[in-house]
Image (cartoon, rainbow, N blue to C red):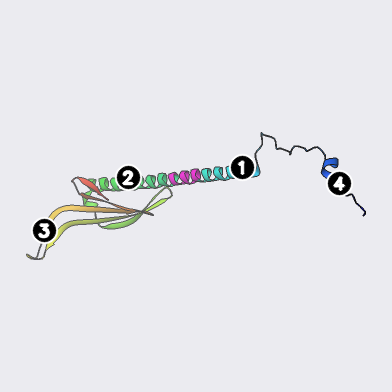
């Protein structure tokens, strides 16, 4: 019988090259994912700041317009108190800077009594109504008397 001797060549044992360390990235850098995440966080933060500034600017403008409207109402009330004979129902437009206001004057100086069919005299009541873009405010007063603002 023929005996065969088989030898198995171990390629790894004879031709093995020394193992190299894997290439590592420098410890001071950032990955692309880290940069993108930080960019998204900054974008969200700056967007929130932007809308906060826009909102506060709009509130400031709205408050300025309402302050101007109240100033117009008070000056008209003073004028009508000073010259009650010229106080009558009227409606006109007031321009102040870039703002436009509609001013309406309603005067009530007598009242009808339907039971006794007579007209009773009473103090002259004046209501000034001022309308702007997004608001309406009014001022009620008695000519020669005290005034108070109505919401």
Please name the residue shown 15% across and 58% down the image. 110
Q: Residue 71 carries which label?
A: 2
Quarter of the rendering occupied by the N terminus: bottom right
Of label 1 and label 2, which has the lower sequence position? 1
Q: Which mark is residue 34?
A: 1
Identity of the residue furthest to the front in this view: 1
Q: What element carries label 2?
A: helix
Please name the residue shown 53% across and 43% down the image. 46
Where does the image place residue 147, in percent across and percent down from the top left? 22, 46
Q: What element carries label 3?
A: strand
Q: Which mark is residue 120?
A: 3
Would you say the residues marked 2 and 3 are in contact, meaning their CB atoms lie under 8 Å apart? no
Please name the residue shown 35% across and 45% down the image. 67
- List the residue tagged with mark 4: 9
Q: Nearer the viewer, mark 4 or mark 2?
A: 4
Q: What element carries label 4?
A: loop
Of label 2 and label 3, which has the lower sequence position? 2
Q: Nearer the viewer, mark 1 or mark 2?
A: 1
Where does the image place residue 145, in percent across and percent down from the top left? 18, 46
Question: How many neighbours does mark 2 have within 10 angstroms: few (below 14), some (14-19), or many (20 or more)?
Answer: few
Extent of the magenta region: 48-56
Q: Nearer the viewer, mark 3 or mark 4?
A: 4
Q: Foreground: 31 or 130?
A: 31
Where does the image place residue 146, in percent across and percent down from the top left? 19, 45
Position of 24 with respect to 17 (left or right) is: left
The residues tagged by marks 3 and 4 sit, at their Cα atoms, a distance apart of 129 Å
Q: Which of marks 3 and 1 is in front?
A: 1
Q: Foreground: 99 or 61?
A: 61
Magenta region, mostly helix, strand or loop?
Answer: helix
The residues tagged by marks 1 and 2 sit, at their Cα atoms, a distance apart of 56 Å
Of label 1 and label 4, which has the lower sequence position? 4
């Amino acid at each position: 019988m023929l005996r065969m001797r088989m030898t198995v060549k171990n390629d790894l044992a004879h031709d093995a090259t020394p193992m190299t360390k894997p290439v590592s990235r420098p410890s001071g850098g950032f990955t692309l994912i880290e940069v993108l995440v930080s960019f998204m966080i900054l974008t969200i933060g700056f967007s929130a700041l932007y809308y906060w500034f826009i909102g506060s600017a709009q509130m400031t403008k709205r408050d300025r317009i309402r302050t101007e409207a109240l100033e117009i109402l008070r000056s008209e009330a003073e004028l009508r108190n000073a010259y009650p004979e010229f106080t009558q129902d009227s409606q006109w437009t007031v321009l102040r800077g870039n703002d436009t206001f509609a001013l309406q004057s309603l005067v009530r100086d007598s009242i009808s009594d339907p039971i006794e069919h007579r007209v009773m005299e009473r103090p002259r009541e004046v209501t000034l109504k001022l309308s702007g873009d997004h608001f309406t405010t009014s001022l009620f007063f008695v000519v020669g008397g005290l005034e108070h603002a109505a919401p």
